[in-house]
Image (cartoon, rainbow, N blue to C red):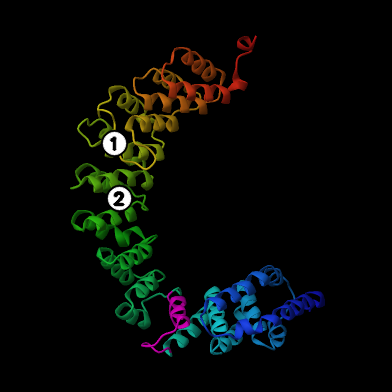
Amino acid sequence: MNEINLAKVKRLLKKADKYENTVNYNGSTVDEVWANLEFIQTMRSDVVMVSQLDGIPTEQLIAECSNNSRKYVCLWLFTLNKNNQSLEFIKKQLYSQHNNLVRQSLVALQSIKSDSARKIVEEYCSQLNQDNTSWVDEYAREVLSGFAYEEIPDHVREQLKTDTELGLTALKNIADIEATNILLDYLESKENPLRWASIDGLEGRPEEDIYRRLIEYTNTGRAQTKLDALKLLSDCESDSVALAVCAIMKHGKSINIRKEAALSLGHINNDIAIQPLIETLQNRKEHPDIIARVCISLQKLNAVSAIPMIHKLISTKAFGKGEIKLFSNSNLYSLAVETLHKLCEKEQTDIFIELLSDKSLEVKLAAIHALRQRKSEETYIALSKHLQIEKDKICIAELEKSIKTLAKFKPATASA
């Protein structure tokens, strides 16, 4: 027994004594919430420090719990320590009828996550009144939904009937194929909370369990279901997924689904998608919003083989003014310059120096930005020369800013 550490524990518990009324209060008023928050904020750093101490047996700690505020602090410590030896004490507080102790007991059991902790929560929830529940009871059911099972337990099956969203949340921690199929069923739900719970539960599932049905959804599902299925597929990296999404990008029934497919290919992170993306760039009849997302995916795939085709896209202006709908950019050609900036080596400057003379203001500004990032004497000279002939005020301001940023690369002959 470390007597110094024990003394620190006793000081902490004595400090908690003055919050006895806060812990005992069972209401749910604004005053109670603020009082409890003050208690937690005041004690937090001391509790964290004590939770890291060694040599304090669980029994000795529990023996010091002479009131509810001390019990609360001990529950807090057991939560941080994930102390499986304290389960009997935690179970006792769970049935104490004091809301703050009950809630913290549930937090501790959720933190410990052992089979024994799960059984305690199961037993507690089985005794709850289904028709008249308090916020503590609702929280208990949420905690129970966070435990893992090999197969779907009876209480989750019941939840799927009485509280479907909570039941779907519980399925997230159940890895068997039945749980996966139920989650897939609810991906088509028109109720957003159920759809979101389904998506959350499907993320990270083995590809072989979800691939076939997600592909079906991209062809036959509702518009929103198609998009959700594509986003889930983008977490997979296999050749079969990449090729299927490429096919959707080319032959999808709506612009929205094709845009999402083009963007998903960058997340899938499979080089097999590069050639189909480049081929899409060659189609002058393609929708510019799809071309924009192709550029973004080529960036993410680091597809240096696409550089000539992207350069040609900028030069030919095949899509008129290049107006697109993207959060970060409204011009296809400036986005294409940004893509070149990401794909080209830092030493590669010729392509951007050439684009300084482009007729498009957006392209020129993007080229200036790319050269400013390529810090060298060559870029300083190129930007300085172009400043002498540039007539657009916006470009002149950007050129001056860039030259100032690159001042240390100014050639010695120029300063003389």
Q: Quadrant of residue 358?
A: top left
- The front one of 119 and 14 is 14
Q: Residues within 10 Å of mark 2 (few under 14, many from 20)?
A: many
- The front one of 407 and 124 is 407
The residue tagged 1 is 291
Q: Which residues, given as a range, are shown in magenta?
A: 128-145
Which labelled disc corresponds to residue 339? none
Which labelled disc corresponds to residue 241? 2
Name above or below for residue 48 compared with residue 248: below
Q: How many circles with numbers are drawn on the protein? A: 2
Q: Amino acid at mark 1?
A: Ile
Instruction: Decide if residue 244 is on the left or right side of residue 407.
Output: left
Name above or below for residue 129 compared with residue 386: below
Look at the numbered disc 1 and give the secondary structure of its residue: helix
Query: Looking at the image, is mark 1 or mark 2 nearer the viewer?
Result: 1
- Percent coordinates x, y for residue 18 in the rendering: 70, 81
- The front one of 195 and 271 is 195
- Percent coordinates x, y for residue 176 in the rendering: 35, 70
- The front one of 131 and 396 is 396
Quarter containing the N terminus:
bottom right
Which residue is drawn at the image coordinates 55% and 25% (left, top)?
375
Look at the numbered disc 2 and give the secondary structure of its residue: helix
Residue lying farthest to the right in this orientation: 3
Q: Amino acid at mark 2?
A: Val
Quarter containing the C terminus:
top right
- Percent coordinates x, y for residue 37 in the rendering: 59, 72
